């Protein structure tokens, strides 16, 4: 953004170089950001949610959290059909994106923390929390908060845990296994969260959508290497958006 608050032209000339004299073009940060969000209605069982989101992916791969992915629909269907899992629990969601899963959980949980690593995604996440809290709702909702959390970042995780020293009952993740280099960091974070509960068992519910055999194997192997037990929830394997999806439950 420029000093007067207007979005700068994404095609920026290098300093001191006239575009007539040089063909070099630098792409400004705004070129990659699409914030043309649409208010969209989603229905899961008897629960209707309205959220701002994109209808197609942004130019920047790092901004995948701006839209609702198949795994989020899968997890929300599972949770809406098994709401007893959530009743009275505290939950933290990893890679929340626009917040569709965490906001659904707030109808049942006593507290929900939504997290994402991307600042642009956190903006829309917080807007959706505000939208949900301001909507007319006859039923009281859980406390909803949003925090920045990059998997493997001990400082950010410690800041969250200072506010929640007792830990969480549930860790949630929906369609968050995209990049191979992020999976070890994901399970490192999950392991730390699960260890907090001590004798009070905490579980990680992961809605996984298969896009490559290599990632399928990696997710299972990383869970095991981090001392975790992973099992497929019976009856959850299905086809969603022409891809195979499944719900995993992961515990210490």
Image (tube, rainbow, N blue to C red):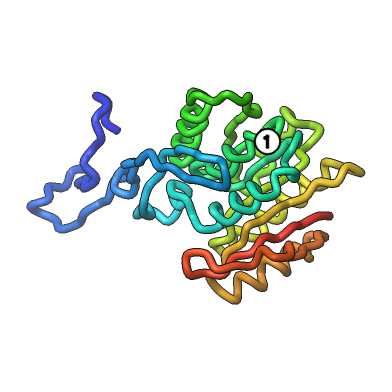
Residue sitting farthest toward the front: 46
Which percent across, then down, holds residue 233? 73, 62
Residue named by callout 1: 108
What residue is rendered at 46% in x and 29% in y?
131
Instruction: Using the image as rendered, state which of residue 13 and residue 91 is in the foreground.
Output: 91
Instruction: Using the image as rendered, state which of residue 105 and residue 213 is in the foreground.
Output: 105
Q: At numbered mark 1, what does the secondary structure look like: helix, strand or loop? A: loop
What residue is rendered at 60% in x and 38% in y?
114
On screen, residue 247 versus residue 229, left or right, reads left
Which percent across, then down, holds residue 140? 63, 24
Which percent across, then down, holds residue 216? 63, 71
Q: Is residue 4 above or below residue 197?
A: above
Quadrant for the C terminus, please: bottom right
Residue sitting farthest toward the right: 199
Q: Is residue 210 visible?
A: no
Q: Which quarter of the figure has residue 124?
A: top left
What residue is rendered at 84% in x and 41% in y?
197
Q: Which quarter of the figure has residue 83?
A: top right
Instruction: Using the image as rendered, state which of residue 51 and residue 194 is in the foreground.
Output: 51
What residue is rendered at 45% in x and 34% in y?
123
On screen, residue 73 versus residue 82, left or right, reads left
On screen, residue 208 versus residue 17, left or right, reads right
Q: Is residue 20 visible?
A: yes
Quadrant for the N terminus, please: top left
Instruction: Using the image as rendered, state which of residue 1 and residue 19 is in the foreground.
Output: 1
Residue sitting farthest toward the bottom: 213
Label 1 crowd bin: few (<14), some (14–19), many (20+), radius 10 Å: many
């Amino acid at each position: 953004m420029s000093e007067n608050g207007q979005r700068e032209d994404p095609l920026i000339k290098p300093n001191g170089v006239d575009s007539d004299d040089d063909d070099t073009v630098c792409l400004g940060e705004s070129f990659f950001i699409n914030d043309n969000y649409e208010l969209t209605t989603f229905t899961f069982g008897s629960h209707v949610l309205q959220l701002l989101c994109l209808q197609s992916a942004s130019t920047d791969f790092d901004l995948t959290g701006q839209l609702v992915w198949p795994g989020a629909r899968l997890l929300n269907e599972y949770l809406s059909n098994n709401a007893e899992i959530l009743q009275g629990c505290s939950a933290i969601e990893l890679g929340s994106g626009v917040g569709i899963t965490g906001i659904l959980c707030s109808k049942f949980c006593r507290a929900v923390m939504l997290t994402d690593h991307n600042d642009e995604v956190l903006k829309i996440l917080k807007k959706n929390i505000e939208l949900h809290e301001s909507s007319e709702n006859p039923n009281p909702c859980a406390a909803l908060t949003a925090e920045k959390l990059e998997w493997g970042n001990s400082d950010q995780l410690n800041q969250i845990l200072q506010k929640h020293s007792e830990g969480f009952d549930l860790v949630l993740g929906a369609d968050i296994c995209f990049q191979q280099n992020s999976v070890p960091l994901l399970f490192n974070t999950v392991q730390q969260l699960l260890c907090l509960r001590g004798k009070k068992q905490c579980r990680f519910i992961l809605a996984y959508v298969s896009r490559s055999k290599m990632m399928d194997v990696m997710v299972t192997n990383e869970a095991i290497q981090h001392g975790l037990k992973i099992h497929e929830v019976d009856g959850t394997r299905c086809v969603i958006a022409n891809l195979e999806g499944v719900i995993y439950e992961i515990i210490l």
